[in-house]
Amino acid sequence: MVAYDGPELERWRRQAQAALDLSASAATTTPSWSCFLAEQGAQLALKGLLHSVGEHAGAWGHDLGPIERSVAAVFGDDWPPGLDEPAMRLGRHYLPARYPDAHPTGAPEERYTAADARAAHDDAGSLVAAVDAISAALRAADAGPPEIG
């Protein structure tokens, strides 16, 4: 059985939720920042899950695709298939959503739309929901069998 540090995941998960909440509120006003915050929310949740089971090396870096692959490798069949695509889409927002020099001309705000922000938030939601499901299973396993008597 994997050792599980629930409080460690919870602190990462709270920060992930803060990013996701800001992402949702910024979707129509500043969609580039909304996309970046959705990526950050997913990144924080995935990293927290890895840290909570002692897989610190897999949580290194900021490229969401490899981080998601680390989670998939650690949790195997318990990790839902198909989450590599949302991770890759979100990972594209890490730099160009923030930096004007990531584009040949213009600012990021001129290149992102509310639809982009909604899609990024949906992708992040898929990844975070999977983290929460794994977390629930780990908590249940950590609690052990119910006492009889």
Image (tube, rainbow, N blue to C red):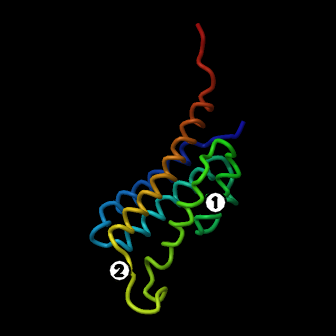
In the depicted view, which residue is nearer to us: 57 or 88?
88
* Image location (x, y in percent) of residue 138: 60, 37
Residue in the image at 48% along x and 64% along y: 40
Residue under label 1, please give it.
59
Q: Residues within 10 Å of mark 2 (few under 14, many from 20)?
A: some
**Nearer-N-terminus badge (1/2):** 1
Q: Amino acid at mark 2?
A: Glu
Q: How many marks?
A: 2
Image: 148 above or below 135: above
Residue furthest to the top in view is 149
Mark carried by residue 109: 2
Mark carried by residue 106: none
In the rendered structure, the answer to whether residue 37 lies left or right of residue 113 reads right
* Image location (x, y in percent) of residue 59: 63, 60
Q: Amino acid at mark 1?
A: Ala
* Image location (x, y in percent) of residue 26: 31, 66
Q: Residues within 10 Å of mark 1 (few under 14, many from 20)?
A: many
Residue in the image at 46% along x and 59% along y: 41
Residue in the image at 52% along x and 72% along y: 92
User: Nearer the observer, disc 1 or disc 2?
Assistant: 2
Image: 80 above or below 143: below
